[in-house]
Each structure stands twice: as C-alpha cells, then as structure tokens.
Image: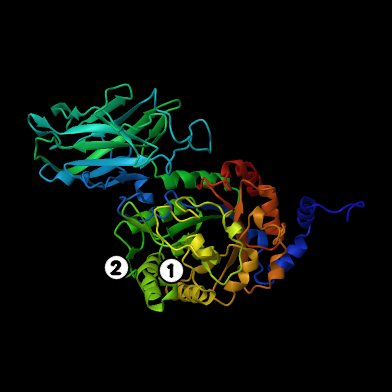
Amino acid sequence: MQDGRSVTRREFIRALSLLGSAHGLLWSRWSPSATPPEDDFFVGANWPWAVYGHDYGWNAWGHDGLSTGGWTYQTYKNSRGFKHARPCPDNDCGGEHSLCIEADLNGAIDSRSRGEVHISLKEHAPIDSRASCRRIAVPVDMRNGSVSCDVWLPSGSLGDEGARNGVQLFLKSEGKDWPAWYSPWKDIQPGWVAKCRSIRASLSDTPGYVDPSFDPSRVIAVGYKLGVNDYSDAKLRDVIYVDDYTLHTNPPVVFKFEKLEVDEDFDYLARVLSGCQRRVIRVFVFCDGEASPQFGSTGEVTGLDERFFEDFDALISAAQRRNLLLIPVLIDFTWCYRPRMVQGVWLGGHSDLIRNPAKRATYINNALKPLLTRYAHHPQILAWDLINEPEWVMKEVEKDTELMLRIPRRPGFSIEPRESEDRERSGDADRVGIDPVGISEMQAFVRACASAVHRYDAQKVTVGSARRQWLHYWTGQGLDLYQFHWYDHFEPDEPFPWPSCADLALDKPCFVGEVPSAKTRYTVREYLEAASQGGYQGILGWSFRASDDRSDFCAAVPQLKAWCS
C-alpha cells in the first residue's frame, strides 16, 4: 500500500530500480564473479528472418540467403539459365558494388534458354528513405511508375546475328502464382557489350508479356531477365553485372547493392543499441527445415549445402564488424509441424529427428557438428539456442489451444493445416497440424545437442522456452543459460513484473528471450527495468524483422536508445 492505495505495477517496477544492493544479491546467486551485474546485462532484439528458414542455403525456390541480399535466381523449369546471384565488389557502372549474376545460357536447351533474377519486396522491403526505421509499404503501387537498372554485359552476350539475345525487366503482383508483367523485349546491340547500359521500362509501355490477373497497384516482386532468341542456339557462360535497380515511385525505391541486407539491418541495430555494452541479436537458422539442413529419402540429415556457409559467414561478418553478439536459434517448433509440400519444397515434418535416436545422430553429426566446428570459440556467438518454444509441440505439456492461436505469427507458419492437405484432425495436436513429441523425447534431444556443443565448442547453450512457468522442463538438461518468453496474454498465469530470477532457484543465469514491442500494455522501459532489477541476465525485444502484430521495433527505438545511453 502507498498513501492508502494499492501500488501499481509501474510504481512497483520503479521502486525496484532503487534496490541496487538487492540486485547484486540476486545476481550473486548464480554468478559469484565480482564483475558488476550491469556490465554483464545484455540488451537487444530478435532478428527473426527475412524468409523464414530460407536465409541459409538453397532449395527448389532458388537461393534467397543472407549472402544474396534477397536476390534470387529463378528455378522455374523453363527459366534456369542463371546459376547464382549475389552482391559483389565488382562494378563497371561507376559504383563500388553490383549484383553479380552467373549466367549459363544455352539456346539449344529450352530450360536454359533464359535466366531470371528477382527480389521479393514482401520479405526484403528496403527502408523508406523518408523514415529512419520503417520499411516501404508493400505491395507497391506502380500504376504511374517505371523501372530501370544499369547493366554490364560481357562479350558473347549478343547472340546470333539476325536473332539477337534480349533483355527484359519484370514485375510480379499479389495473386496466385504471382501474376507477372514483362517489359518489351530489347535486342542486345553491339554497342552494349562490355559497357554499362541503362535499361528503363514504363508501365505505360505495351508489355512483352502480361498475365491477365497482373495488378500494377499491388507489386510484390521485381526482376531482370536475359534470354536467347527463340530462333538461336547461342550460348553465354559468364558474369552479368546489374546496378541501381530502381522503382521510379514516390519516393523512389533503389537497390544499389553496396551493402547486404543483413549489414544494413545490423548497422541500424548497432546504432540504436550503441550505448549498451553488451548488444545481442537473436537470429533464426534452420527453422522448419525448408532450406537447410539437407535430408535423405527417409528423413535423415545428410549435410549442409554449398551455399549454407556463404550465408552464415555473411551473418557472422556483419555481427563482427559492429561488435554485436549473436544467439543463433537452430530450429523452431514448426520443425515438428506435419509435413507439407509448397511448390516443390517440404516444410516441417521432422519430429522423428527428435524422437528417433539414430536419426537424431544424423542431425548432430551432419548439421550441428559442421556448424560448431566451423565457428568454434567465435567471439560473436554468445550462445546456441537449440530450439525455439519447444513446448508448443510437446504432447504432455498442459496448454490451452486458444493460447497457441495467439502466439506471434511467424512468416510461413499457419496454426491451421493448409486446406489442400489431407490429414486426420482428431485431437488438439492434429487440429493444429502438429506431429507432437513427448517431454522425455524432447529432453533427450536437448541433452544430446547440448552435449555436442560442449564437445566441439566452448560456447553456451540455451533453449527458448515459450513460458516462464515451463523452465523446469529444462533444468538438468545441460544448458548454460535459461530463457523464457513473455507476451501479455500470459499475464493471468504469469503476472508482470516477473518475480525475481532468484525465485526460480535455477543453477544457471536466465534471460528474457522475447517480449512484445506491439500489442502490449507495458513500455519498453518497464520491460528493461523488470529484467534488470529482477536479476535476469538480459532481455531481447520481439522483433526487428517480423511483421506480426506483436512487432513494432521502430516504436521501441526511442526508449531503447534512452536506456542504452
């Protein structure tokens, strides 16, 4: 009571901030070091993913990884003339970098007679030039706009005389199979070869091709195409350079390729958190297994593809240049979603890798071990997060299905099975499309993975528990850090501010891995104070990248800056 009335939660948190000595006592429960707690407390954000598990490695959709900046070579059966695309430090158009496209066109082979590269604006929307944080609105209205880029073509690009190779720019809009608009075909001229050439197309031009359902007011992807003339068997095996790909809207949207998307994002996060000594970014890797690791015919893990480490190296490099610490989350609970095929790619369906010791060993030996040995002792990795919110797929854990419906919506994740899927739907697990595993099975998986980390690396291990009240499942499982997540709809069972970390009687430190930045009754400052004064090791906001209704990182920026300063 205070002046005859109840103390509010906000008043309680502010009062806690005065208890510096109590804070130190709580900290010493698990950290006997003389290092002041404030020097060890970390602040940061979840950087979930750009394309939910397709950020590392390639699959039937192409390679949309961190090292490509989101630019993806096309894999349609009639458009496989490009083999790779990535920003690189080569440019003959006046800049320092460009999009380097490896072409392998052959007019005699229909599938390789044309090549395309595109970027999805929905997953890779650039920052709005009029705002310091927010991304451009997608879909983009191109009804009165045009598109252009600079292109450098190597010798051999002309094709046959009288049947020249050609280039087109294209846009795709929302709708089934992404209906497309292609600019008029432009024959490559002799004066274009080994020179920088600007190509521009307007939506008012007569298109070279357009799908009837294309909607220029709702553009979600843009790209570049080079093709061999239908009357030619010409070949082209060389590198094409594209620069300054621009959507001439208001304001213009420009892809300059000077930085990877991960570098731009980490630049911003480093500036926001610059006053904090320990700045941590929690990132997601395998997710539901849609791009990596690779799987055999019976579901066993066979390895990591040749593009995987290009992408993970890009992540590590971006963090290292900005002195950001990383918590890579290896798999998401949607790993245990029932399998579904989407345009040639299997999503989920990997519960056996948790339940079956022999299959689990293939995951540890062929995915986890190569990752650990390559980045062993790397100073940017604070901890490996073995699985995100595993309790949602653990069948003996008591949980409310309606509560599951309110978890932050992950891109690509639907709590209900797709209508096209034919499955039995008896019981909660089937109703929500989950292939559940037992508590003991999940614990055995965690113990085995934690043991592998400690065998090959000195880095810490954690698990992203979905709720504070479920932390007891992870004691005694070989973890070095405990972690829980909290959202407002947990409050009836887990009131905020959280009781102190000491009340949990844990044998290792604990941090708060996710708190909302939108759809919440509390401020960022209140979350930070509750974690700091409660004796937790750190706190990470949800989220910088996701677009669900619990994420508004831009709104959280002023208070994060104030806290760190």
Q: Give the residue pinned by disc 2.
A: 297
Point out the image quarter for the N terminus: bottom right
Residue 146 appears in the rendering: yes
Task: Name the kind of residue labelled 2 in the image.
Answer: Ser
Residue at image point 72% right, 57% down: 497
Distance from the alpha carbon under mark 1 to that under mark 2: 15 Å
User: What is the count of numbered marks?
Assistant: 2
Q: Quadrant of residue 40?
A: bottom right
Residue 42 appears in the rendering: no
Horizontal side, residue 555 vs residue 457: left or right: right
Residue 81 vertical placement versus 475 (above, below)? above
Front residue of 171 and 49:
171
* Residue with the most extreme right position: 4
Task: Name the kind of residue labelled 1 in the image.
Answer: Ser
Horizontal side, residue 477 vs residue 198: left or right: right
What percent of the width, then of the height, locates residue 232? 9, 37
Residue 9 vertical placement versus 113 (above, below)? below
Closer to the N terminus: mark 1 or mark 2?
2
> In what element is the residue under mark 2?
loop
Horizontal side, residue 147 vs residue 159: left or right: right
Front residue of 536 and 498:
498
Residue at image point 45% right, 27% down: 251
Residue at image point 63% right, 74% down: 507
Residue 416 vertical placement versus 196 (above, below)? below
What percent of the width, then of the height, locates residue 546? 51, 48
Local crowd at mark 1 within 10 Å, few (<14), some, or many (≥20)? many
Q: Give the residue pinned by disc 1.
A: 351
What percent of the width, then of the height, locates residue 123? 43, 44
